[in-house]
Image: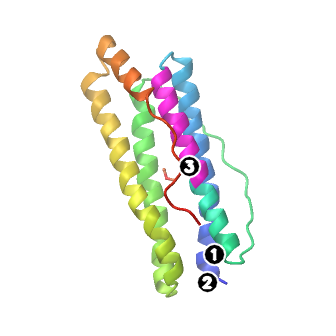
Amino acid sequence: MLDTKVAELLNAQVNKEFYSAYLYLDFSIYYGEQGLEGFANWYKVQAQEERDHAMLFLQYLQNNGCKVTLEAIDKPDKTFASFGEPLRAGYEHEQYVTSLIHTIYDAASTAKDFRTMQFLDWFVKEQGEEETNAEALIKKYDLFGSDPRALYMLDGELAARVYSAPSLVL
Ligand code: FEO
């Protein structure tokens, strides 16, 4: 069994990751409605990755004999006035998720829960990649987003993103 506080935080993270999936699916729907199918694809793939993250936390809890409680997922409530806004909201959200992962890591470290620390190592690295990707997307949009032809090409680039299963297997 895991430390009670660590298990609580891991259970909460299941919900946070499903919320991330919901949020990015909402972004995907927004871009699809605007005719930017590449951006829509990019966030649809991101939503799939977030579902994977949720399932990894869930599986880890089950593997350690912990009860899993599924809580209600918040409704994504943002409205967007420009194509760039979801990109910035996504970056801020990833920074928030990184802080959540670090909080769990800190609790695991305090509890000398080395198994959970090792499990979380993958997520610490993953968050670094997710923040980098989100930031890179903003940079590209800021450079090219105001030119319709360049935006069309960027949309085409984002259409090429394909889903791949997470490298972490439990
Ligand atoms: Fe599951 Fe985007 O962090």
Residue to which mark 1 is pinned: 7
Label 2 CB, ligand 1: below 8 Å? no
Q: Which of 69 and 96 is in front in this view?
A: 69
Residue to which mark 3 is pinned: 50
Q: Position of residue 55 (x, y in %)?
A: 64, 57
User: Quick one: which residue is furthest to the bottom in this view?
Assistant: 112
Under mark 1, the amino acid is Ala
- Tally of numbered tags: 3
Under mark 3, the amino acid is Glu
Q: Is residue 59 left or right of residue 24?
A: right
Instruction: Give the extent of the magenta segment.
Output: 37-52
Q: Do the residues labelled 2 and 1 touch (CB within 8 Å)?
A: yes
Query: Mark 2 to mark 1: distance in Å?
Result: 6 Å
Crowd tier of the residue under label 2, counting other residues whose Cα lies within 10 Å: few below 14, some 14–19, many 20 or above: some
Q: Residue at x 64, y 72 (%)?
A: 8
Tell me which label, 2 or 3, sits earlier in the chain: 2
Q: Which of 24 and 85 is in front in this view?
A: 24
Secondary structure, mark 3, is helix
User: Quick one: which residue is furthest to the left in this view?
Assistant: 143
Q: Can residue 11 be seen in the rendering of this structure?
A: no
Name which quarter of the figure residue 145 lies in: top left
Residue to which mark 2 is pinned: 3
Q: Position of residue 153 (x, y in %)?
A: 34, 18
Q: Which of 5 and 126 is in front in this view?
A: 126
